Image: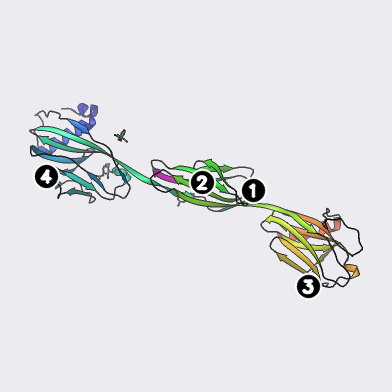
Amino acid sequence: MGISGCLAVPGRCFVVLGLRLLLLVPAGVPVRSGDSVLKDNITVRQGDSAVLKCSVDSKVSRVAWLNRTTILFAGKEKWSLDPRVILLENTAVTEYSIKIQNVDIHDEGPYICSILTNKKPKSTKVHLIVQVPARITNITKDVTVNEGSSISLMCLAVGRPEASVVWRHHSPRGIYTFVAEGEHLELTGITKEQSGSYECIASNDISDPDIRTVQLTVNYPPFISKARSTGTSLGQKGVLQCEATAVPRADFEWYKEDRRLFNGLNGVKIENQGKQSLLTFFNVSEEDYGNYTCVAMNIMGISNASIILYGPGAMHDVNGSAMFPCGSLGLLLTTTIFYLLKF
Ligand SMILES: *[C@@H]1O[C@H](CO)[C@@H](O)[C@H](O)[C@H]1NC(C)=O
Ligand SMILES: *[C@@H]1O[C@H](CO)[C@@H](O)[C@H](O)[C@H]1NC(C)=O
Ligand SMILES: *[C@@H]1O[C@H](CO)[C@@H](O)[C@H](O)[C@H]1NC(C)=O
């Protein structure tokens, strides 16, 4: 019996070889190939135990369990060095079964129970299939990008059968949408609406999906969303309000003509509360009336709006709000210098 024969029918060959070894059959004596039966596959989860069963009867003289070409047990004698492999002794006499504890993916494959009855070898093959619940192994860390840029988010997952990966997006407005499938999510020309949390869902039906999220922060320049002009009588308290949406959050500055106003000076208070800034006059005097400029800035840019503090008799639009482009070149220059000094 040559090696070429082995290559032609490997499964059959190693059983025969195994038995030759086992029974110390002289090499010259031909061994008749016996029947081979394929039993159902055995499916176990990684980490669980697998019991491989084999039926024997009183006529059986020799038994062995093999993992591919390697003998695990020959009769009651253990050949395998793997402590996870044990012979189940207290089973019925008609059973010759082994147990593999803490099954790993490398254990997947064919296992052969080889029996010899009246010098006739017979083998039963069981295919061990190892399942692994879907699990995310690496995911992009929370990330901040500038509006208009591009990024690739990664979510690597393992699983057997192979895990499928989908991305869902929770927008800042609370909208939850499916984005894409696959371990890599490419986002190009990013808008501020694309900020929020990106959920990576890895699943393969073996267990509950594994879910992890990446927080995407999108930086964008301030946009003044509210600039409220106010009519106030002399001697009263007056408040000018300026609101800007921006990421990172805007810093505010207030100007009267070209002159910057500071908190606590000239009888004004400047209060920044989140995305809005309030300029408060405690006791409005004649010279307080006029045009003010609110400047909102962050690392992405700068934006400004004119706001009027007017007297009770002054003409104003019904909405009570006005937004003008910043008119004064001097102010722009001052602001730019402030801006440059700041960053
Ligand atoms: C057993 O598993 C093998 C390999 O995965 C596959 O080809 C075969 O179809 C399976 N047989 C049964 C009965 O499930
Ligand atoms: C079966 O054989 C494979 C390949 O040699 C090995 O990686 C695995 O550990 C073996 N498993 C058992 C239970 O013997
Ligand atoms: C995750 O992936 C990143 C990028 O490929 C790599 O630098 C990092 O080492 C990985 N982390 C782990 C735990 O594998």
Rate crowding at label 4 as few (under 14), some (14 to 19) or many (20 or more) other CA atoms within 10 Å.
few
Q: CA distance from mark 2 to mark 3?
A: 50 Å
Q: Is mark 2 within 8 Å of ligand 3?
A: yes
**In the depicted structure, whether residue 29 falls above or below residue 214:** above
Q: Which residue is mark 1?
A: 193
Q: Are marks 1 and 2 in contact (CB under 8 Å)?
A: no
In this rendering, the label closer to the viewer, 4 or 1: 4
- Residue 343 screen position, x and y as percent: 70, 59
Q: Which residue is mark 2?
A: 154
Q: Tell me which label, 2 or 3, sits earlier in the chain.
A: 2
**Which of the pair 29/303 is nearer the observer?**
303
Q: CA distance from mark 4 to mark 2?
A: 55 Å
Q: CA distance from mark 1 to mark 2?
A: 20 Å
Q: Based on the displayed image, in which of its 4 quarters is residue 115 positioned?
A: top left
Q: Based on the displayed image, in which of its 4 quarters is residue 159 positioned?
A: top left
Rate crowding at label 2 as few (under 14), some (14 to 19) or many (20 or more) other CA atoms within 10 Å.
some
- Residue 176 screen position, x and y as percent: 57, 48
Amino acid on which disc 2 is placed: Met
- Identify which residue is drawn at 17% across, 48% down: 87
Q: What numbered label is drawn on residue 20?
A: none
In this rendering, the label closer to the viewer, 1 or 2: 1
Question: Within the magenta stretch, is there residue 170?
Answer: no
Amino acid on which disc 4 is placed: Val
